Amino acid sequence: MKKHLIPNVINHVNKPTTVYCGVDPTASSLHLGNLLALISLFHFNILGHRTIILIGGATGSIGDPSGRNTERSPLSSSIVENNVLAIDRQLRKFFDNGSNYALRRGFIIENENNNVIIKNNLEWFQKMTALDLLNDIGRYLRVGTMLSKDSVKSRMENEGGISFTEFSYQLLQAYDFWYLYNYHDCQIQLGGSDQWGNITAGIDLIQKKKITNSINLTETNYKEIIDNKKSKDAFGITIPLLLTSSGEKFGKSAGNAIWLDDKMTSTYEFYQHFVKVADTDVEKYLQMFTFLKDEEISQILKTHFESPEKHYAQEKLASEITEMVHGLIGLKKARLATNIMFGTPIKDLCGQDIVEAFENDTQLLTTVNRNGILNCSIDRVAVSAGACKSRTEANKLIKSGGFYLNNERVKDPQHKLVESDLLDGILFIFRTGKSNYRLVKVIG
Ligand SMILES: *[C@@H]1O[C@H](CO)[C@@H](O)[C@H](O)[C@H]1NC(C)=O
Ligand SMILES: *[C@@H]1O[C@H](CO)[C@@H](O)[C@H](O)[C@H]1NC(C)=O
Ligand SMILES: *[C@@H]1O[C@H](CO)[C@@H](O)[C@H](O)[C@H]1NC(C)=O
Ligand SMILES: *[C@@H]1O[C@H](CO)[C@@H](O)[C@H](O)[C@H]1NC(C)=O
Ligand SMILES: *[C@@H]1O[C@H](CO)[C@@H](O)[C@H](O)[C@H]1NC(C)=O
């Protein structure tokens, strides 16, 4: 990324400038599909440029026209509002965790106070009247050009056509760029390659609308402002939409998004997603997604291909990205969970570590009282720890060989849980079926 991106734009970024990238608040979290754009933006940030992330509070309520045959059902404004807030918080965390990660990898961050600005385009669209829209934006854009965009064309060929609302998406995104250009001195928009049409629509609008009426032009500064604006062109950068070597969209697992929010995708699943990356993709991903130096990446690959079955490069990739997104605590959690779930002998694990790492993970960790479980038969404990719904279910599962205590199969439903089953006296682990884990913390 670093290598391919910079030469093309070097002339325009040799002095600090401002770069923006938009995200849609279609859910309460961003997902892996957003990550490459965020990392690219982050590189600009590290090099001392101002970076703006624009959350589409307005555009998100319209729905984007791409990748589907039918109109999206609109999200209610309260859902969009909540999503905007959640994504705003998440982005701040992302840039915090990311900066710490970059520092640990030896980067010098040029921006002292993390020069990231988060905006919501509802700020300008909610004040805009229908007449403003037609006069300030509509007037400058040609319908023919808008119709020729692939995302619009493909929908027009469809029976249902495209609504005026979704058709207007590019108009709004064009105005976003103009607005940020005009009021925040932003000259570069970055986005996935599917954003090409929206970005060029913005550049177009900026060129036509350059001499703006909304700035108060007085006799004295008129010429200066115009010269200034003229000398500052707007640019777009697109980054490829990643496909895996098997042709799937990057960042999905069986069609589902991998979220950046650890309550929606656990750090363990997040980590595992990268452990499963194909050998043919791993080098590319190490370069695009991590802040490792080229020499380090070559060294990793060399070690990896000496015994590829160990997935050394994948483990590195998973560790780096998990650390960047979820911080060192998140990485520790993911590693512990991996150890538990991949059969590291339980006695080699530290009960206290596990309890600390998963203390907030109520889906995985349950707390029970010592008196309620010690010397009780395992089928009862299974119910009180929430691993099974009923003793009947527990008995069935145990008889069929699908119930494990501390990764060892339980054969007798009447087996009594004793002190020595507890890891460091505070924890035991149930597993039902292939991979349903329940960590049980024992108190009292
Ligand atoms: C504009 O952005 C939307 C939302 O990401 C996308 O679906 C659409 O294809 C883009 N349209 C153009 C013309 O770039
Ligand atoms: C333009 O000037 C008027 C009067 O001085 C002021 O009220 C208005 O806010 C200014 N508009 C902008 C966009 O700065
Ligand atoms: C890092 O990410 C984790 C998981 O998303 C989060 O809980 C934590 O607060 C973040 N750390 C910082 C310093 O932002
Ligand atoms: C759990 O939540 C508490 C309170 O929010 C926080 O102080 C602590 O760091 C969290 N622990 C982990 C491992 O995330
Ligand atoms: C469990 O049984 C052992 C041995 O019979 C006994 O020493 C211990 O106090 C019992 N523990 C509880 C919590 O009942």
Image (cartoon, helix red, strand yellow):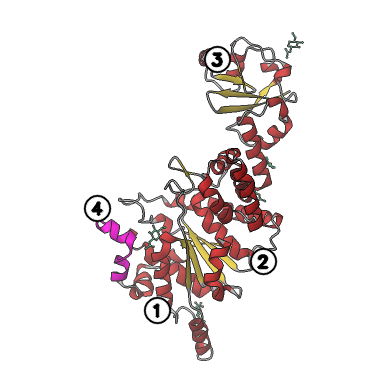
Q: Is residue 78 above or below residue 341?
A: below
Q: Residue at x 55, y 28 (%)?
A: 435
Q: Residue at x 33, y 75 (%)?
A: 139
Asked if ligand 1 lies within 8 A of label 1, the reply is no
Mark 1 to mark 2 CA distance (whole Å) = 33 Å
On the question of residue 121 being in view, the answer is no
Quadrant showing the N terminus: bottom right
The residue singled out by tag 4 in the image is 160
Please tell me which of labels 4 and 1 falls first in the chain: 4
The residue singled out by tag 2 in the image is 111
Question: Which quadrant of the figure shows ligand 4?
Answer: top right
Quadrant showing the C terminus: top right
Q: Is residue 196 above or below residue 439?
A: below
Residue nearer the viewer, 83 or 437 = 437
Three-letter amino acid code of the residue under disc 3: Ile
The residue singled out by tag 3 in the image is 398
Q: Residue at x 38, y 74 (%)?
A: 136
